[in-house]
Amino acid sequence: MNTNINTNIKDFSSYKNVWVFAEQREGVITPVVIELLGEGRKLADEIGVNLCAILLGKNVDSMAKELVAYGADTVYTADNELLEKFTTDAYTKVITDAINEFKPEIVLYGATHIGRDLAPRIASRVSTGLTADCTKLEIDPDDKKLKQTRPAFGGNIMATIICPNTRPQMSTVRPGVMEKAEKNDSRDGKIVPISFNLSKDDIRVEVIKTVKTKKDLVSLTDANIIVSGGLGMGGPEGFEMLKQLADKLGGVVGASRAAVDAGWIDHSHQVGQTGTTVKPNLYIACGISGAIQHLAGMQNSDFIIAINKNETAPILDIADYGIVGDVKDIVPLLTEKLDSVDDLIELVNA
Ligand SMILES: Cc1cc2nc3c(=O)[nH]c(=O)nc-3n(C[C@H](O)[C@H](O)[C@H](O)COP(=O)(O)OP(=O)(O)OC[C@H]3O[C@@H](n4cnc5c(N)ncnc54)[C@H](O)[C@@H]3O)c2cc1C
């Protein structure tokens, strides 16, 4: 066993600034980027460096201005038709070269399908560490290193990971967890086109068609009100009942994994660790026990109402209001009573 501990303190002084990968789809910045800019701002201020975004795409000018409005001090842009749609090869090449040239000390990516595909490839190219799916980021006050926290072992432990020996420190960050940056159109920032070498031969994948899944239509992440159901709903007809309540409230229907596994509703509705993380103003949990993996995806909701026939269900411990009773009685009653809910919706959306 090698017991030598490497005590060499490496000089990372040429690495500066916090970078956010500005993922865009069809010319629209993805919502997680706004969250990363909110979090990145805090990290950059704590270290005393700039917050930068790196944006790849075609005709990126208006998106670059938007990133400045959301807090980026500098936006590095690569504008080319070969970058219009995401491909691992092209994006990896351009970002790897930019990292080697500009030497950021931290790079954040959304833990989307694109971010999870891209970040490991770049980490390997620049030989640095990457923590996947972080839910909390902090700067160590003593040495200014990034402390990256993520759930591990099915959410049963939280692991805090540091990257002491290489730069940049890179993380993918779970969408829906960090606070969004505020938009301010009068903010100033630099937009810096970067030079890059890219040809068709660099790209081994050709995107023939983009097919939208139902998930894009279910927008759980953006919903202000979510009415969610679990095994206690008893079957797909129970979800019809929830849909009526959700429609009345102007919300969307969510589900536990158990309900999804039972085939009562599509996976695109699943809330939780292996589903979507949500932070609505109001979350109504109906017939959901409150397993840790479910709580991981919804416990930051502003206001939680739980309906469960078992008064010892863990979901009731985190609920602001708990109703102990049968969902088959209570949900239709609620729907009926909420005939005039405009005031309530206004309150929740305020
Ligand atoms: C690696 C891993 C990842 C996971 N990821 C997720 C995830 O992303 N999301 C997720 O939700 N789960 C996830 N799970 C599963 C999780 O552990 C639970 O099994 C699941 O959340 C339970 O769903 P449930 O609350 O609907 O069902 P149950 O735990 O069976 O709870 C049903 C609840 O309904 C109540 N009930 C029953 N009948 C009625 C009635 N008529 N009226 C009122 N209440 C009633 C019961 O009292 C009970 O509390 C994951 C598990 C693992 C191991």
Image (cartoon, rainbow, N blue to C red):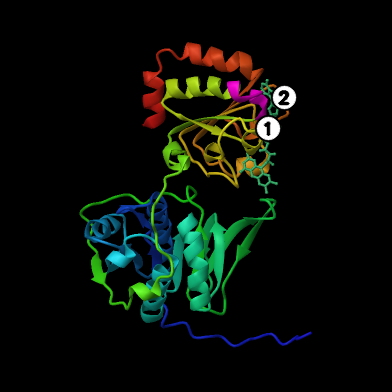
| Magenta stretch holds residue 223 | no
In the rendered structure, find residue 22 and report the number of the disc placed on it: none
Left or right position of 81 against 275: left
Along the horizontal axis of the image, is 274 left or right of 174?
A: right
Helix, strand, or loop for circle 2? loop
Magenta residues span: 231-237
Q: Amino acid at mark 2?
A: Asn
Q: Amino acid at mark 1?
A: Ser
As helix, strand or loop, the secondary structure at mark 1 comes to loop
Q: Given the current orientation, which residue lies at the most extreme right position?
A: 1
Residue 289 badge: 1
User: Pointer 2 and pointer 1: residues touching (CB < 8 Å)?
Assistant: yes
Which numbered marker is on residue 310? 2
Q: Is residue 166 above or below residue 68?
A: below
- In x, y percent, where is residue 265? 57, 32
Query: Is disc 1's CB within 8 Å of ligand 1?
Result: yes
Residue 99 visible somewhere in the drawing: yes
Query: Residue 43: x, y in percent?
Result: 44, 63
